[in-house]
Image: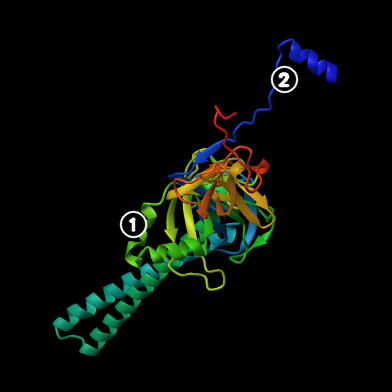
C-alpha cells in the first residue's frame, strides 16, 4: 500500500478529497392558508314525511315500490273504500230529507206569516212556525257537513304523495288491516337534502369572541364558505352545499351547536340516512407554515433545527397544527418569521452540527 501511494504521488495523481455538502434550508415566512375542518354528518331529506292512513280499513293496493321516485299527488296506497262510499250515500240521502223538511217548514212559516198579517192566526203560531223553519235550516247545514265529511273520508281511502321524493321501506302488505296508527312508509323529499352536524365548542367560542350577536347570525351564516360532503367510502359529492341554519342554543352536555347544510340533489344520488363528513374550509391568516419533513418527532415533542449565525443547528421545541393537506404543519409557537431552519434531511441532523458549507470552503 505504501508503494502504491508513493507510485500515485510520483505520477502526479492527487488523492480524492472528502467534500461536505450543505443541508437544504428554508427561511420561514408568514402566509395565509385554508384549513379543511371535518364534521360528522347525516343526510336528511328536505321534507321527510311519515305516510300514515287517515281512516281505518283493509289495504287493497300498494301502488309503489321501495326506492321508487314519485311526484307530488301520485297515488301511493288504496284502502277499501266500500264503507266510506256507503257512508257518503247515506249522508246524501239524509241531506235530501233535510232539504225536503226545510222546504215544508218554509212554506208553513210563510203561510202563517201571511195569515198573521191578516190577523187570522196568533203571534204564537207565527213564532212557532218560524222556529221550526230555523231548525230545518240547521238540520240542512248539519246534513251538508255530514256529506262533506263522508267525501273527505272517501278521499282518505286513496293516499297520495304530498311531496315529490323517494319511497322508503314499506312494512305493510296488501290485505293488512291499517289504521291512523299504522306507518305505511317514509317519503323523503330529495330534491334538496340537508346534512345535519354539530359545530364544535372551539367554533362556538370563536363566534362569541368575535362578537356575533343573535340578530347577526343570519349574516354570519351567509358569509360562511361553501362546504363539501364526503361519503364514508371517501367519495366526494360533486355539488357544494351551504350552511343554512345554526341553532341558537348550545347543548349543555356537548358544548356544541347543531348546524344544517343544504345540498342540491338533481340526480337523486343522496338519500336520507347517508352518513359522511362535512368539510368546511376555514381561513387562517398570517401563520407560519413549514413542510412536515422539516419537523422531527421525538416521543411527545416536536422539534425543528434552527440554523444559527455560525451555520450550526440548534433544536427548537415547537407546537404544530395539522393543515389537513398531508404536506404541511402550522407552527403555532417556537419559531419567528425570518428564522432559518433545516428542511430536507432534518432527521439526520444532531444538536450543534454544522449544516451549511460555503462552496469555496476547503
Q: CA distance from mark 1 to mark 2?
A: 75 Å
Residue at label 2? 15
The residue positioned 36% from the left and 68% from the top of the image is 99
Report x, y in % for residue 251.
52, 70
Residue 236 appearing in the image = yes
Give the quarter of the figure containing the N terminus.
Answer: top right
Q: Is residue 270 left or right of residue 247?
A: right
Q: Earlier in the sequence, mark 1 or mark 2?
A: 2
Report x, y in % for residue 283.
43, 49
For numbered disc 2, what is the local secondary structure? loop
For numbered disc 1, what is the local secondary structure? helix
Residue 349: which disc?
A: none
Give the quarter of the figure containing the C terminus.
Answer: top right
In this rendering, the answer to whether 233 lies above or below 209 is above
Q: Quadrant of residue 246?
A: bottom left
In depth, the one of 211 and 122 nearer the eye is: 211
Report x, y in % for residue 210.
37, 63
The residue positioned 79% from the left and 16% from the top of the image is 6
Q: Is residue 274 left or right of residue 151?
A: right
In depth, the one of 345 and 32 nearer the eye is: 345
Residue 73 appearing in the image = no
- How many dots with numbers? 2
Assess disc 2: are there few (<14), some (14-19) or many (≥20) residues with their C-alpha within 10 Å of its C-alpha: few
In this rendering, the answer to whether 262 lies above or below 259 is above
Report x, y in % for residue 84.
55, 61
Judged from this view, the residue extending furthest toward the top is 11
Assess disc 1: are there few (<14), some (14-19) or many (≥20) residues with their C-alpha within 10 Å of its C-alpha: few
Residue 219: which disc?
A: 1
Amino acid at each position: 500500500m505504501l508503494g502504491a501511494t508513493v507510485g500515485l504521488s510520483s505520477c502526479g495523481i492527487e488523492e480524492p478529497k472528502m467534500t461536505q455538502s450543505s443541508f437544504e434550508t428554508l427561511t420561514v415566512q408568514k402566509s395565509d392558508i385554508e384549513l379543511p375542518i371535518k364534521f360528522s354528518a347525516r343526510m336528511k331529506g328536505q321534507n321527510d314525511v311519515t305516510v300514515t292512513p287517515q281512516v281505518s280499513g283493509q289495504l287493497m293496493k300498494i301502488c309503489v315500490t321501495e326506492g321508487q321516485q314519485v311526484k307530488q299527488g301520485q297515488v301511493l296506497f288504496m284502502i277499501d273504500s266500500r264503507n266510506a262510499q256507503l257512508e257518503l250515500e247515506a249522508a246524501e240521502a239524509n241531506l235530501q230529507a233535510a232539504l225536503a223538511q226545510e222546504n215544508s217548514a218554509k212554506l208553513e212559516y210563510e203561510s202563517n206569516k201571511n195569515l198573521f198579517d191578516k190577523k187570522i192566526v196568533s203571534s204564537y203560531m207565527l213564532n212557532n212556525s218560524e222556529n221550526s223553519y230555523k231548525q230545518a235550516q240547521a238540520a240542512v247545514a248539519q246534513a251538508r257537513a255530514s256529506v262533506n265529511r263522508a267525501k273527505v273520508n272517501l278521499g282518505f281511502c286513496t293516499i297520495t304523495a304530498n311531496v315529490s321524493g323517494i319511497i322508503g321501506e314499506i312494512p305493510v302488505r296488501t290485505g293488512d288491516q291499517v289504521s291512523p296508527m299504522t306507518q305505511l312508509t317514509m317519503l323523503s323529499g330529495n330534491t334538496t337534502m340537508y346534512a345535519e352536524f354539530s359545530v364544535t365548542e372551539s367554533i362556538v367560542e370563536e363566534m362569541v369572541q368575535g362578537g356575533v350577536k343573535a340578530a347577526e347570525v343570519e349574516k354570519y351564516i351567509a358569509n360562511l364558505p361553501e362546504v363539501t360532503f364526503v361519503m364514508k367510502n371517501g367519495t366526494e359529492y360533486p355539488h357544494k352545499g351551504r350552511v343554512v341554519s345554526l341553532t341558537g342554543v348550545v347543548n349543555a352536555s356537548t358544548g356544541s351547536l347543531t348546524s344544517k347544510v343544504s345540498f342540491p340533489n338533481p340526480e337523486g344520488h343522496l338519500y336520507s340516512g347517508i352518513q359522511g363528513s362535512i368539510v368546511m374550509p376555514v381561513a387562517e391568516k398570517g401563520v407560519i407554515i413549514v413542510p412536515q419533513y422539516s419537523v422531527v418527532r421525538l416521543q411527545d415533542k416536536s422539534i425543528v433545527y434552527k440554523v444559527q449565525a455560525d451555520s450550526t443547528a440548534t433544536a427548537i421545541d415547537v407546537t404544530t397544527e395539522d393543515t389537513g393537506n398531508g404536506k404541511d404543519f402550522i407552527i403555532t409557537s417556537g419559531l419567528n418569521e425570518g428564522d432559518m431552519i433545516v428542511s430536507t434531511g432534518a432527521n439526520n441532523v444532531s444538536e450543534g452540527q454544522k449544516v451549511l458549507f460555503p462552496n469555496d470552503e476547503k
